[in-house]
Image: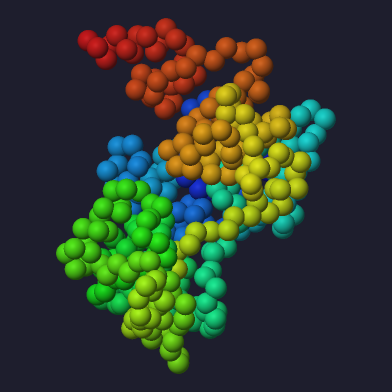
Amino acid sequence: MIKTDILIIGAGPTGLFAVFEAGLLKLKCHIIDALPQIGGQLSELYPKKPIFDIPGFPEVLAGDLIDNLMEQIKQFQPGFTLGERAETIEQQEDGTFIVTTDKGTKHHANSVAIAGGLGSFEPRKPLIEGIEYYEDKGVQYFIKNPEQFRDKRVVISGGGDSALDWSIFLANVASEVTLVHRRNEFRGALDSVEKVQELKNLGKIRLITPAEVVGLKGSEQLESVHLEIENGEPLDIETDYFIPLFGLTPKLGPIADWGLEIEKNAIKVNNALDYQTNIPGIYAIGDVNTYPGKLKLILCGFHEATLMCQSVYQRMNPGKKYVLKYTTVSGVDGFDGSRKEAEKAVVKAIE
């Protein structure tokens, strides 16, 4: 039996940052993840993808962000159960929980924080006849290593942020990048749309809209894609890779059977207070939760993790007044010091 204060389900960025916030409160964490490595989607799907909305980092690769988070939390020595899926949960008479994985590993925790991102996920595949034959033969649904496409011809299909961002990134890697979308309008960020248009004008991206990839050709490997173009003639494009980026189909998996309130495949939480679910002691933070005004951003997950940890502290220390201290004053190790000591540190710093 593994015992901990907070059991975190999901080793993505939100779950990892929760370890840091818990550590400041002297709370011990253990993390379960079905993947064999930490990092969640950032490590599994796009470790080399640049992220632009992390405060203090004009640009950081997804994999590097995970490395930095691991460096930040190593002082708090969290435990990890990797390659195992959280299967069942049992609430004990004292309000604590026992979570058992699909491999039988049991975890006993005061509180449980579900930080599973989108849950288990499958790519949304386009309805193209024979596409399964070309999987790993030129058709890919994720980009893990952009160098794989160095000096290759690439056709990307999609209209969201992933399609736009990867088209921009691969414009400086691949020998030829074609972006195909079934509409003239894109769903992604406006600045990304403008960047794609700029690269198109510079001849670094071929943009074909409104159009759709409807066929694939090639004997042993993918050799070309067949496009149907609205108000235009059909077109065959020779290519080495076809990357349809239509998003993911998320599934909560066994967590959906835990008695939690679910809305559109996400867990409902109380965002007015602490991101607790309908079951006291079980929280949901990051992309896995939903509430009015929810934004699925890593930044928002960090905020939710912080308030969750404050709530767990009060749950474990009922009636004990917690005084917020800033790390700039007390440092990481000084969060159990007195207010007077913190004030002295401020005075000394000013002097």
Residue in view at x 46 percent, y 57 percent? 43
Would residue 261 be found to the left or right of residue 299 on screen?
Answer: right
Q: Quadrant of residue 313?
A: top right
Q: Is residue 147 above or below residue 31?
A: below
- Percent across and percent down for residue 160 are 41, 56
In the image, farthest residue toward the left = 202
Q: By what rule are the colours in the image chosen? A: rainbow
- Percent across and percent down for residue 335 are 46, 21
Residue in view at x 66 percent, y 16 percent? 318
Would residue 186 be found to the left or right of residue 87 on screen?
Answer: left
Would residue 195 be found to the left or right of residue 343 on screen?
Answer: left
Q: Quadrant of residue 315?
A: top right
Q: Quadrant of residue 152?
A: bottom left
Location of the N terminus by quadrant is top right
- Percent across and percent down for residue 242 are 41, 75
Q: Please say whether residue 217 is visible from this viewpoint.
A: yes
In the image, farthest residue toward the front = 231
Residue in view at x 47 percent, y 77 percent? 214
Location of the C terminus by quadrant is top left
- Percent across and percent down for residue 81 are 61, 51
Q: Is residue 162 above or below residue 300?
A: below
Front-most of 243 and 82? 243
Q: Is residue 326 above or below residue 139?
A: above
Would residue 102 be found to the left or right of residue 330 on screen?
Answer: right
Front-most of 226 and 337? 226
Residue in view at x 27 percent, y 59 percent? 196
Q: Please say whether residue 61 is visible from this viewpoint.
A: no
